[in-house]
Image (tube, rainbow, N blue to C red):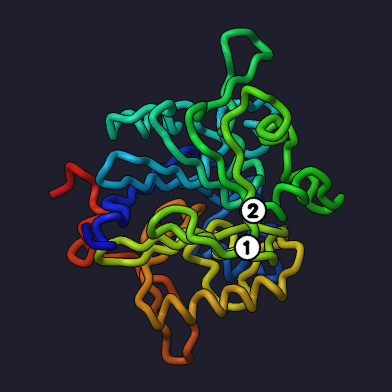
C-alpha cells in the first residue's frame, strides 16, 4: 500500500446550525458601511453565520468530525439572542444523509472550545436536565493550551466558553477518550493540526491532505470569506495583531501551495481558493464546479 492510499478519501462540509452574531463584533475596527455590503445585518445588527463542521472519511471506514457546532442545549432566551436555528439542521441529520450516526464517528477534532464549536459535544438526554455524550465512541482531540485556557479564561472571553460543554470530558470516568495535543502534530494520516493564538490561546486550524488536494479548515482565524484582508479581524480576538500575522502566514502558504480554504462561519461559501488582487490583497474565490477535486464532491453529486 502506498502512503497516499492511507490518506482521507472524502471531505464533506456539514452545516450544523445557522445563527447570528453582531456584525460590529465580527468585523472589529472595520466600519459598518464596508462590511454591510458583503454581510448585510438584520434589524438587531446581526449578520448570518453558520456552524460548518467537516466530515473526513478514510477508505477503511474511519470517520473524523472537525468541530461539532452549537448543539441543542440552548434555552429559548439564548436562541433568541443568537438567532439559533439548529432544529431542522443538526449534525445527526447531516450524518444520516451519509449513512452515519454519531455513534459511528471515530474521532472528534475540536479547533477550540468556544460554544459555537464545542456546544454539540453533549446532547439532551431523556430526563429534562440530563446531558449525554453525543459522540460516545470517538476519541476527542483538543490542544492542551486551549483546554487549560477554557477552564480559566479571562473576563473578556469568558462568555464564549461554557464549562458545561467540555469539562465533563476530563472529569467523568465514563467519558469518551480525551487526547490533549501539544503544538503542531499530524494526529491522523494526512490530518495536521496547526495552533494559532490570536483568536484565543491554543486554537488549532486543521490541514487535510488527500491524494489530489490540501484543504485548510480555518476555524476562527478567517471565519468567513469576508475576513481575508489584514484588518478584517474579529472584535472577539484576544490578540488581534497576532491574528493578522497568523493570517498572513497561512495565506502565504495557501497561495504558494494552492491550498483550498474552508470557512466555518461563512453563510454561503464553503470551499474557496486564494487570489491576489492588483494591490496584492488576498480574496477568496469560491471553487467553480469544474475545479472541485474528487474528494470534495458530495457522493451523489453529478
Ligand atoms: Zn472562537
Give the residue at mark 2: 143
Residue 66 x %, y %:
48, 47
Q: Image quadrant of residue 268?
A: bottom left
Circle number at residue 183 = 1
Image height of 282 relative to 112, above or below: below
Depth check: 251 or 75 in front? 251
Q: Image quadrant of residue 64?
A: top left
Residue 235 x %, y %:
72, 62
Depth check: 223 or 147 in front? 147
In what quadrant of the picture does the N terminus appear? bottom left
Q: Is residue 218 visible?
A: no
Q: Cβ of disc 1 within 8 Å of ligand 1?
A: no
Q: Residue placed at 40% from the left, 75% from the top?
A: 274
Residue 174 x %, y %:
62, 22
SS at mark 1?
loop
Q: Earlier in the sequence, mark 1 or mark 2?
A: 2
Q: Is residue 158 visible?
A: yes
> CB under 8 Å between callouts 1 and 2?
yes
Image height of 202 relative to 53, above or below: below
Q: Residue placed at 79% from the left, 43% from the top?
A: 151
Depth check: 80 or 162 in front? 162
Image height of 185 relative to 140, above or below: below
Amino acid at each position: 500500500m502506498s502512503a497516499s492510499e492511507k490518506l482521507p478519501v472524502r471531505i464533506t462540509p456539514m452545516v450544523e446550525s445557522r445563527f447570528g452574531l453582531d456584525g460590529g463584533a465580527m468585523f472589529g475596527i472595520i466600519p459598518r458601511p464596508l462590511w454591510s455590503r458583503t454581510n448585510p445585518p438584520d434589524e438587531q445588527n446581526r449578520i448570518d453565520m453558520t456552524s460548518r463542521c467537516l466530515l473526513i472519511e478514510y477508505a477503511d471506514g474511519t470517520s473524523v468530525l472537525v468541530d461539532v457546532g452549537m448543539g441543542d442545549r440552548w434555552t429559548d432566551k439564548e436562541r433568541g439572542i443568537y438567532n439559533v436555528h439548529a432544529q431542522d439542521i443538526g449534525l445527526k441529520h447531516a450524518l444520516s444523509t451519509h449513512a452515519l450516526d454519531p455513534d459511528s464517528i471515530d474521532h472528534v477534532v475540536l479547533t477550540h472550545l468556544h460554544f459555537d464549536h464545542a456546544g454539540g459535544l453533549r446532547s439532551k438526554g431523556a430526563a429534562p436536565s440530563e446531558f449525554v455524550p453525543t459522540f460516545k465512541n470517538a476519541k476527542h482531540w483538543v490542544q492542551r493550551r486551549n483546554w487549560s485556557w477554557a477552564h480559566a479564561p479571562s473576563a473578556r472571553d469568558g462568555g464564549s466558553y461554557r464549562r458545561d460543554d467540555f469539562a465533563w470530558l476530563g472529569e467523568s470516568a465514563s467519558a469518551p477518550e480525551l487526547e490533549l495535543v501539544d503544538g503542531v502534530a499530524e494526529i491522523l494520516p494526512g490530518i495536521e493540526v496547526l495552533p494559532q493564538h490570536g483568536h484565543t490561546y491554543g486554537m488549532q486550524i486543521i490541514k487535510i491532505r488527500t491524494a489530489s488536494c490540501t484543504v485548510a479548515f480555518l476555524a476562527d482565524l478567517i471565519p468567513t470569506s469576508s475576513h481575508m484582508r489584514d484588518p478584517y479581524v474579529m472584535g472577539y480576538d484576544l490578540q488581534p495583531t497576532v491574528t493578522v500575522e497568523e493570517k498572513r502566514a497561512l495565506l502565504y502558504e495557501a497561495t504558494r501551495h494552492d491550498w483550498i480554504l474552508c470557512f466555518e462561519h461563512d453563510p454561503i461559501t464553503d470551499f474557496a481558493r486564494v487570489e491576489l488582487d492588483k494591490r496584492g490583497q488576498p480574496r477568496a474565490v469560491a471553487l467553480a464546479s469544474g475545479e472541485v477535486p474528487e474528494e470534495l464532491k458530495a457522493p451523489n453529486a453529478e
